[in-house]
Each structure stands twice: as C-alpha cells, then as structure tokens.
Amino acid sequence: MQELLERKNGLHRSILIVDDDPVTREILGAMLGDLYKIGYAQNGIEAMDLIKRDAHTLSLVILDLHMPKLDGFSLLKTLHADNELRRIPVIVLTSEKWSEVQCLQNGAADFITKPFDAPQIIRARVEHSIELAEDKVIIHETERDSLTGLFNKEFFFEFAKKIVRMNGHKAMDAIVIDINRFRIINELYGRAYGDLLLKKIGGCVHQAVQEYGGLACRSDSNSFFVYIPHENDISQLIEQFIKTTQGVIGDDKISMRIGIYSDDDDSLDIQMRFDRAKLACRKLHNTYSTCYNLYNSELHDKELFHEKLINDMDKALEEKQFQVYYQPKYNIRGNVPVLSSAEALIRWFHPDYGMISPGVFIPLFENNGLIHKLDRFVWDQAAGQIRKWKDSFGITVPVSVNVSRVDMFEPKLGEELTEIAANNGISTAELLLEITESAYTDNSQQISDAVSLLRSFGFKIEMDDFGSGYSSLNMLTTLTFDALKLDMAFVRNICTDNRAARLVGIIIEIARLLEVPVIAEGVEKKEQMELLKTLACDIIQGYYFSKPLPSDEFYELIEKQQKENEYAHN
Ligand code: C2E
Ligand code: CA
Ligand code: CA
C-alpha cells in the first residue's frame, strides 16, 4: 500500500496534525506515519506559521477545534479566506455533531470524530480528501488534451513545478517522445489514423507514469513530454517503454524518436531539462526507426557552438571572413588531362575557431534561411572570378556553384542568378549550377520544375552526389540536366569493391545514352583515376589533381595550362 501510494505521483505527501492533546497527535501520527510525512503543531498560531512556511508542499491539515491561543475554528476561517491556502484540504477533529455545519461552511473537507474509528477508515478519509483536493486542481477540461486525456503543455509545466516542490526537490528526468514523419502519416493514412496513433501512444505514456510516478502531457501535435522521478538506469526503462508501445501500435511503419535528459542534479529548472531532452531528440531527426538519445554535455557544447556560428554569420560576411576557393576539374578523355572548369567551395576563416569547413555550417544555415544570403555571396564572387580570368587569359573557365535545396524554393531564382551573371559581365551558360540529388529525393516535383526553369534561363545544371539517394533512377527519367556528378562514395570504393566499379560503369553508360558527361569527384589516387578513365568517365575532380585553392593559386593553374596548350600547339 505504501509503495503504491509513493509511486503514484513519485512523492511522499505531507500532512500537518494540529492538536493540543499529545495523545491524539501520537495516535493519528501512528496511523498515518507510514504513508505520509507528518508534521505537528500544538496550537493555532504554531499551525499557521507552519502552513504558511509549507504552503506549496502541504497536502492536508488535520485540525482540532478546541485549542489554546488560536482555536481551530478561527484557523479554518483564515485558511478559507486566503486564496493560496484555500487549496489545502482540512479535516476537522470533532466530538460534537453541532459544529459540523459551521465547519463545512468554512471550507472543511471532512470530519474525523473522536473517539477514533478503525485506522483504515481514517486512512481512507485522509486519502480521499487529498485526492479530491488534488483532482480539483488538476482536472479542468482546459487543462487536458481532449484527444489523449493527458495534460496540455501549459498546465503540465505548472503542475510539474508543484510536484518537484512537494517532492522535496527530488531530481526528475525529462523525456521527449516524437513520432517520426507524423505529417506524412497523416497525409498518407488520414487524420483519423493519426488521431488513433496519438491515442495509443498517449495511453502508453499514461500507463508509464502510473507505474513510475510523475506526469506527462502532449506538448504539440506529434510529441509528448514525460517527467518522472530520476532513474539511474533510464535506458532500461526506455527500452521497456519502446517495446510495450510498439506492441500497442502494432504497425512497423510507425516509429518514434525519444530524447532524454537524465540527471540527479536538481539545480536545473524543468524548462531547461526539457530543452535539453528536445535537443537530444532533435539530433535523431533523420532516423526512420525507433531510437533514443541521452543528452550529454558534448551535445550542449555543440549546440552552443552552432548557435554562435549562426549569430556570427552576418558580421562574418561584412568582415570578409568568408572566402571562395576553387577546385579544378580536369577533362581526362584525351591523352593528357586538361583543366576544364572549377567548383566554387566556400571557406570560413573565423577569428576564434580558424578555418571552418562548409560541412559544419552549411547544414546549420539551411535550417534557418541564412543559406540563401551566403550562396548569393558565393555566386557573385564566382561570377566575378569568371570575368576576371576571362579578362586575364581571354578564355572562359566555367565555374560551378552549389545551389542549396533551400534556394530551389526561391520563386525568382532564375532572375536572381541571371542578374548576378549580367552584373559581372558573363553569360548564364558560363555559370554552372550544382544541385544535390538529395534535394530531388525530398521534393521531386518542385525540383524538376525549378531545374527546367533554370535551364530555360540558359544555365547548365550538374546533378551533384548522384547515386546517394534512393530515387536516382527515377530522377533520370523525369529530369533533364547537363552533367552528372557521381557521389564520392562510389569513387572511394571503386578500386576495392568490384560491384562499385561495375555500378559506375553502368551509370556512365546510362549517361552516354542521355548524352551528358560524367564527373567523378573525390578522386585521390592514381589508380582511381586510371580505372575511371578505362570506364570512360569524362571529368575528374579531387585531391589527386588539386585541393580547392584560393583564387590567386588557381590563377597559376590556368597559367600553367595555357603554357602547356601553347607547347602542344607548337
Ligand atoms: P560537395 O558539393 O559534394 O563538394 C565536394 C566536397 O568534397 C568539398 O568539400 C571538397 O573539398 C571535397 N573534396 C574534393 N576533392 C576531394 C578528395 O579528393 N577527397 C575528399 N575526401 N574530399 C574531396 P567541402 O568544400 O568541405 O564542402 C562540403 C560540402 O559543403 C559540399 O559538398 C557542398 O555540399 C557544401 N558546400 C560547399 N560550399 C558551398 C556553397 O557555397 N554553397 C552551398 N550551398 N553548399 C556548399
Ligand atoms: Ca558540389
Ligand atoms: Ca558532391
């Protein structure tokens, strides 16, 4: 019984027994002491002090009417008149029937008559009064989510804070549960199925807090917050929860991701605990199977670092901390490789962190719209560079720029790029656009439309990272583009994995049919280059020839190429 009660909300409730008679205090204390934390007061004044002190943690007062100093009646009246203290239920100890009505009028929750009934009756009355008072606080329609019956978010935080206070600030673990791809599930299977799913998961969550204590809510459309007393081995509990819940859902297409903040240090407030659990959950965003992630300080440091980069971006553009590097692409169809074009790749020289790779900041900027500003900067620089080389050498070295998936949603992208080309005195055909295949995987119709439009402006499109997604073949049939860039993963294995080499051969044959050249990037070794040449790959980009270079070093490459050309012609 004791355990059940303790676990119910993960707390030991407190009761104050107010009576001037030590024997009565002792009897009641003995009856209730194993279920509740008991405090004692000998008179109304002492009681009032304790009630005020423990206003947030006290669950019940048992009050004798006849006491010296301040009597029970006056105390009851004072409590009833106080907005804050009114929520604490009071059971009055009495031997006279006549006083009951008066007590009820003044807010008494119940009575215990002297001489006392059997202990179980007293316990039941106490428990009932507490529950009733708590339910009064808790169960308001507006405080519940109508679909799952769990709390809503606002009320959840309010009540969770109370629980922590009542619980003597015992540490709690914060858990965030998200349903993967919920929006798509709703679209594919209908809202009714989505609602059913939420109900099922909500039911499992409810059951878990019944068992372990604590409380839960639906925080927004597809996620739940759970707050439970700290567990040393939370993973075990979570694994059990996942197993049960997946059994209840009974559909392997549905998966969840779970972020956890588990710490026995109670100094961090509840909101922060959930922020950290959310962060741990967010880190799982690309997963399609059920999994969980525990927050750790490394994750926090990384998040702070990322936030700083996002904050620093505007200033960095102003202070010219970004530089565009150029990596050459070589045409290997002839006997000797010939410099044919370049890819513009951004570099950030940060005053505090030194050179930061675009692999770190590009994904951050794609999440918040900053990427478009940065890409515009790169496009403009690259276009200006094409013009400068044209002026210096009298030839065009076409430069490809990366167009982020986010840019593809800009309605005036074609006009914008055309304007950049015109402002720098080059044609649209001289600026090549690299679009990653994964953008197509995410949103094929949109990307197809945008690519056709860009081509109608005269731009050449290179399909980047080809073969990395799962819609590569599908894309070949619906999209027209001008060059195909093999995903680096193929090249990495080409000399060791026979299947990778054969696959590259097949892709190159398909490209032949479509009449587009194939570019292999990430070529580091001579053997890779030679194998690609025998497979009839057209263009090679990679450390084997050169790393991405600042523009002045690239200038020397063009110079060298021109000398070789002259030499070949002589
Ligand atoms: P990506 O477009 O696939 O670019 C190729 C990446 O491979 C570059 O990394 C390049 O430095 C690297 N690389 C080139 N040759 C080799 C090689 O032989 N071996 C290996 N291991 N790597 C090689 P980087 O510059 O760090 O860029 C990473 C990614 O960041 C790019 O992948 C691209 O998706 C993105 N990115 C870079 N610059 C921009 C930009 O201006 N705008 C946008 N939107 N994305 C950019
Ligand atoms: Ca690229
Ligand atoms: Ca690539």
Image (cartoon, rainbow, N blue to C red):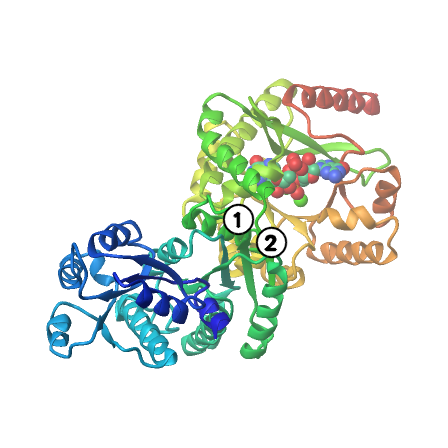
Q: Amino acid at mark 1?
A: Arg
Q: Which residue is mark 1?
A: 405
Where disc 2 sits, the SS reads helix
Mark 1 residue crowding within 10 angstroms, few (<14) / some (14–19) / many (20+): many
- Seen from the viewer's position, the closer of residues 198 and 239 is 239
Name the residue: 65% across, 26% down: 395
Could you give the CA–CA distance between mark 1 and mark 2, rounded to whole angstroms?
A: 8 Å
User: Is there a contact, CB below 8 Å, between mark 1 and mark 2?
Assistant: yes
Task: Name the residue located 75 percent from the left edge and 56 percent from the top edge.
Answer: 507
Above or below, 280 against 125 in this view is above
Q: Which residue is mark 2?
A: 438
Quarter holding ligand 3 = top right
Q: At numbered mark 1, what does the secondary structure look like: helix, strand or loop?
A: loop
The amino acid type, in three-letter code, at marker 2 is Ser
Q: Residues within 10 Å of mark 2 (few under 14, many from 20)?
A: many
Question: From where the camera sits, is residue 186 visible?
Answer: yes
Q: Which image quadrant: the C terminus?
A: top right
Left or right: where 466 falls relative to 435: right
Residue 428: give x, y in percent of width and height: 53, 37
Residue 218, horizontal then vertical, whole percent: 40, 65
State left or right for residue 31 relative to residue 559: left
